Amino acid sequence: MEVALIGASGNAGSRILAELAARGHYVTAIARDPSRIAPGDRVTALSADVYDSSTVIEALRGHHAIISSIHFTASDPDTLIAAVKASGVTRYLVVGGAASLELASGKRLIDSPDFPAEYLDEARAGIVFLDKLRGESDLDWTFLSPSAMFLPGERTGEFRLGDDQLLYNDQGSSISFEDYAIALADELEHPRHVRRRFTVGY
């Protein structure tokens, strides 16, 4: 496929870029500073400002799918979603957050008393983004939430998928950027969660 990846130089984005390129996809890797994007035969680095609609729309046109991997506080959801729609590309995958996932109690992770205060702004912005996607009927969107701990690690290929509930194991709730990239690429190639959120964890 030809895929536009917004935020290709970030922690998750760089792993997604590597995973897609290794699978043979052609990736337009979009970042504010394209010099930070790892080069590759199937990678075209491109500079774009997500607040500049006309530039983003032009960068996204002509792809089979768009993946967004940027901090929610570093973009405007209305501007970005509108740009995706205006590009004419209907398949849209979003690197989501864990804050809106449900705990065993039925409460959301963000509503737990020990949710870190330093992540509240990003978490709230992610919830707003997901709510806006849920109101979209023109995009075949997917929002993939990581587990509570989303960190560099190994590419094991050993993980579980879930729906709206936070995934746990004996070590807690976590997923590596590398295994998250596998789950997202799998969904791109074999869509099973169109117009839905799902989650990945160990």
Image: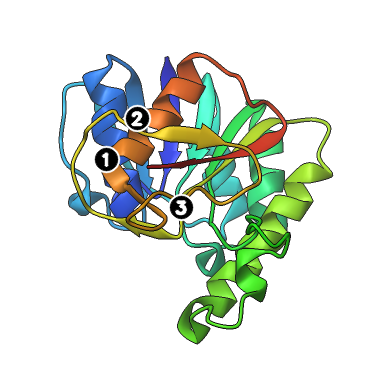
Between the residue at mark 1 and the residue at mark 2, the CA separation in whole angstroms equals 7 Å
| Sequence-wise first label, 2 or 3 | 3
Q: Nearer the viewer, residue 81 or 168?
A: 168
Residue at x-position 65% and y-position 44%: 83
Q: Are marks 2 and 3 in contact (CB under 8 Å)?
A: no
Q: Nearer the viewer, residue 163 or 125?
A: 163
Please state which amino acid type lies under the numbered disc 1.
Glu
Q: Mark 3 highlights which residue?
A: 147
Number of the label disc, if any, that sits on residue 77:
none
Number of residues whose C-alpha sits closer than 10 Å to that of mark 1, classed few (under 14), some (14–19) or many (20 or more): many
Residue 152: x %, y % from top left: 23, 53
Please give left or right for residue 38 compared with residue 185 in the image.
left
Residue 139: x %, y % from top left: 73, 31
Residue at x-position 30% and y-position 30%: 158
Residue 144: x %, y % from top left: 54, 41
| Sequence-wise first label, 1 or 3 | 3
Residue at x-position 53% and y-position 25%: 65
Q: Mark 1 highlights which residue?
A: 178
Q: Mark 2 highlights which residue?
A: 182
Please give left or right for residue 123 compared with residue 88 in the image.
left
Q: Is residue 147 above or below residue 30?
A: below
The picture quadrant where one finds residue 196 is top right
Is there any visible trace of residue 10 in the rendered image?
no
Q: Are marks 1 and 2 in contact (CB under 8 Å)?
A: yes
Q: Secondary structure at mark 1?
A: helix
